[in-house]
Amino acid sequence: MPIVKKALITGVTGQDGSYLAEFLLEKGYEVHGLKRRASSFNTARVDHIYQDPHVDHARFKLHYGDLTDTSNLTRLLSEIEPDEVYNLGAQSHVAVSFEAPEYTADVDGIGTLRLLEAIRFLGLEKKTRFYQASTSELYGLVQETPQRETTPFYPRSPYAVAKLYSYWITVNYREAYGIYACNGILFNHESPRRGETFVTRKITRGLANIAQGLEECLYMGNIDALRDWGHAKDYVRMQWMMLQQEAPEDFVIATGKQYSVRQFITWSAQELGLTLAFSGAGVEEIATVTAIEGDMAPALKVGDVVLRIDPRYFRPAEVETLLGDPSKAKEQLGWEPEITTQEMCAEMVREDLKTARRHALLKEHGMDLPVSTEG
Ligand code: NDP
Ligand code: GDR
């Protein structure tokens, strides 16, 4: 396949980066990804598309780098001269940003400036288009419902404040230097590749493990939080679409539907054949199994408590509710999500159940693998 364009993806080893890399490779792009040096392998999400660099015409290439390293980013941009840069790299966990606020600001805020400044410094303003992974967390303490492109921001975490800087520096470089730079203001999006400590994956993986006897109980924070959850596959398509327009603009990407964490727990349990009853209030609330159908949860019986509240997972400042209005994306770009929240939840549970069953089988044969439950 002839190479159509060259793209650089920061955060290629993350959830979105892996789906976007697949998407761009299918479109005929040469895809360059930034990966961080780690003491163990961190490329599990892209191993299936990795191409041996010794093979001629490899179109997927990984480079060591970091958003805190200006010279590294500048060198890579000058060597690759990409047509498109997708800045997806970030310390992306809101709760962790309260623990590591300075690092989060450096990566999620100044990291964006480093890339934009490198584009300018290298004279790539007219060649390289730039996508910034902005977020519904910018709306934080919401000022209007549903949230759209014009809704005022009110960030509620070090993560969101760092992303606010990135949002505005992207707008500023577009206006000041004419760079084709866009913000995708994406609401929560999930998939079987979602990091294990974000709430949806924590639930689907945790319940699948409990059903198979690998964990005993799920410890959760604020299960009344409301979110607008879409599927990452639908959202990366839109990231690409935003860079294919005549003029750069910012877009909200969301489903326009909102559910509680508690609802997501109920759906996940149902997918495992479990009916749950919630009882108690506040930190005393628990979820108990009241009925079991099928054979997906051999380790459970009616009356078992599978969920408790642990205040450790409450945030110093919480974003209680988010609901996006994707009308602009729909009207201007014809984008609509294809996968519903409940379908996505079912897919995540199915995938986590497969893994849990494999682990349970190994355990049965005396080959116990440690199952991490941190986060
Ligand atoms: P992930 O946490 O799954 O992936 C983050 C990526 O950033 C990983 O590849 C990670 O590398 C990389 N990264 C972390 N720190 C650095 C650093 N210092 N230098 C370079 N790379 C780094 O996030 P998602 O895929 O879910 O999200 C992608 C982007 O979209 C993020 O910027 C996120 O903030 C934003 N976003 C996400 C939403 C969502 O619901 N998923 C919604 C709105 C915005 P490693 O694998 O080594 O950890
Ligand atoms: P969020 O996602 O903070 O919206 O950021 P997360 O899944 O972490 O939390 C969603 C909501 O669930 C509540 N919650 C818990 N969250 C976690 N992680 N663990 C728990 O045990 C738990 N219990 C309840 C949270 O308090 C919150 O209200 C995600 C990230 O992908 C960001 O990078 C992105 O910008 C936004 O989505 C849009």
Image (cartoon, grey):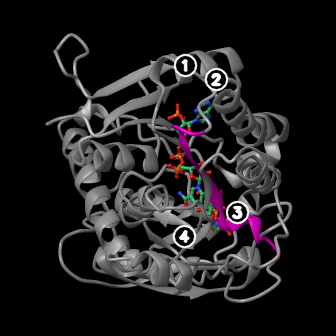
Label 2 sits on residue = 122
Q: Secondary structure at mark 2?
A: loop
Left-right relation of 148 to 206: right
Q: Secondary structure at mark 1?
A: helix
Q: Which residues are magenta?
A: 126-141
- Whichever of labels 4 and 2 marks the residue nearer the N terminus, that label is 2
| Residue 93 at x, y percent in the picture | 65, 50
Q: Which residue type does callout 1 highlight? A: Ser
From this view, report whether residue 36 is shown above or below residue 94. above
From this view, report whether residue 170 is shown above or below residue 53. below
Q: Are marks 1 and 2 in contact (CB under 8 Å)?
A: yes
Distance CA(mark 4)–CA(mark 2): 53 Å
Discs 1/3, front: 1
Distance CA(mark 3)–CA(mark 2): 50 Å
Label 4 sits on residue = 307
Distance CA(mark 1)–CA(mark 3): 48 Å
Distance CA(mark 1)–CA(mark 4): 51 Å
Label 3 sits on residue = 310
- Give the quarter of the image for residue 154: bottom right
Q: Which residue type does callout 4 highlight? A: Leu
Q: Which residue type does callout 2 highlight? A: Leu
| Mark 4 nearby-residue class (10 Å; few <14, some 14–19, many ≥20) | many
Mark seen at residue 78: 1
- Residue at the image position 43 percent from the left and 30 percent from the top: 33
- Whichever of labels 1 and 3 marks the residue nearer the N terminus, that label is 1
Can residue 130 be found in the magenta stretch? Answer: yes
- Whichever of labels 3 and 2 marks the residue nearer the N terminus, that label is 2
From this view, report whether residue 10 is shown above or below residue 51. below
Q: Secondary structure at mark 3?
A: loop
